[in-house]
Image (cartoon, rainbow, N blue to C red):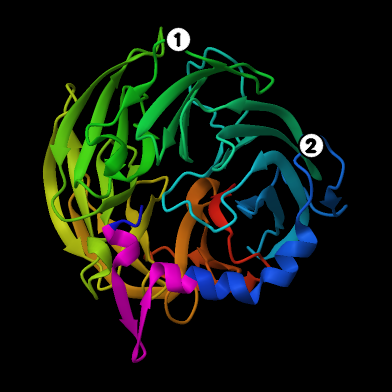
Amino acid sequence: MTTEREQAKVRVLGKTYTRRDVLKRSLAAGAGALALSAFGGRFDAQGVEAAGEGNLHTGAVYTMTDEVANRVVAYYRAPDGTLTEAGRFPTGGLGSGRGNLFGQGAVVLSGNKPGARVAVGANHLLFVCNYQSNEISVFRVEPNALVPVSKTSSGGIGLLSLAVYQDLLYALHQNSGTISGFRLDAHGALTPIPGSTRTVAGGAASNPAQVEFSKDGAILVATERETGIIDTYLVDKRTGLLTGPRVNQSNSREPFGCAFDNRNNLFVAEGNFVVPAVGAVSSFRVLDDGTLQTVSPSVFSGGTDTCWVVITDNGRYAYVQSFGDSRISSYTIDPDGTLVLLQSAAAFTGLGPGGFDLALTLGSQYLYGLNGQGTISGFALQPDGTLAPVGSVGGLPPSTVGIAAR
């Protein structure tokens, strides 16, 4: 089904594009490369292309190709923020083949939060969505390779986004409009939690975008693009089960990516269905029962189709990327969650439409932006929140989506 979002158009440099136009043109240009890279979905270490320099434990960036034979592309991150490709690693699952994951959280790293029930080291496990086969692939991060450890059915249709808190993982599905929960062991194996699958408030037609845990793991959030709803669930950490959803209305159309700061304030990017220059971000205070109280409603970024948002570890800055013009916009965050636009055009990851996702490293020293033109651009965060370019890498298939960093 073609949604309002895919039908929406954006005018850039005198030409009118739909988001699907951009993807179709990119895919046509890269069809030959995609055909050469496709291979069977065996979930083993065969076919892995890996370099022998650098250390993924000390600095890395990851994305996934979302080809039919889905792969993770790993990069070593040097101390100056520059990236060198470490290898391409089969997930053993099937991607959409189209870059069809219009959400945030398709590639995520394990955390290392206090009180974890199992000892999962920070960034030692990588979790990846396989959209078409509806499977979660888990890799163990080694210094020079990603080692596949498990592949598990996600429990829904159109696997789009993952969220991890300690030994809990929840998966969000675009086509079925459902979320499903899993327990994670120290080795990366996932076990479904009986009775955990829930339908988001707007159901299968809601076109959800992201699932995310609050910093303390007490709240799970899911955004619904078509309905303008932000679902919140109370999390029972003992059983892993959810209570909810509590339905909260977005301040603007098309709530998309979301992130929490270190005070558990919630920040939600608002795409506004590609209406030019009206992308925005809202901030919310999250009450104990899951009710969202608006702090800053729809602070405009100046970008078109603002979709992806990240928050620095110190909670002082927010960065968003807009699909329609590939701009990164920056905001300052007050302790109460108030947002103030710092720079409407802090940086660009490409020319014209194609900005896809963002990731911050541990300590928020570097920010990386994925672009549908097959590139990842890096930026060093300055003390005043401005961004300094550190270079970019290319050669990614045009279907590439999702990004994670350490």
Where is residue 111 shown, x and y percent of the image? 53, 31
On the rendered structure, is 208 left or right of 373? left
Question: How crowded is the residue under tag 1: few (<14 C-alpha within 10 Å), some, or many (20+)?
Answer: few
Please state which of residues 230 and 342 is positioned toward the viewer in this rendering.
230
Point out the tag, 2 or 1, that comes first from the N-terminus: 2
The question of residue 383 being in magenta is answered with no
The reply to whether residue 93 is in sight is yes
Where is residue 168 shown, x and y percent of the image? 48, 21
Q: Secondary structure at mark 2?
A: loop
Where is residue 268 shown, x and y percent of the image? 27, 49
Where 137 falls versus 19 (above or below)?
above
What residue sits 31% from the left and 51% below the top? 256
Range shown magenta = 4-22
- Numbered circle sitting on residue 153: none
Where is residue 200 shown, x and y percent of the image? 28, 31
- Numbered circle sitting on residue 194: 1
Kind of residue at badge 1 = Pro
The question of residue 18 being in magenta is answered with yes
Please state which of residues 113 and 349 is positioned toward the viewer in this rendering.
349
What residue sits 18% from the left and 56% below the top? 253
Residue bearing the label numbered 2: 42
The reply to whether residue 336 is in sight is no
Kind of residue at badge 2 = Arg
Question: How crowded is the residue under tag 2: few (<14 C-alpha within 10 Å), some, or many (20+)?
Answer: few
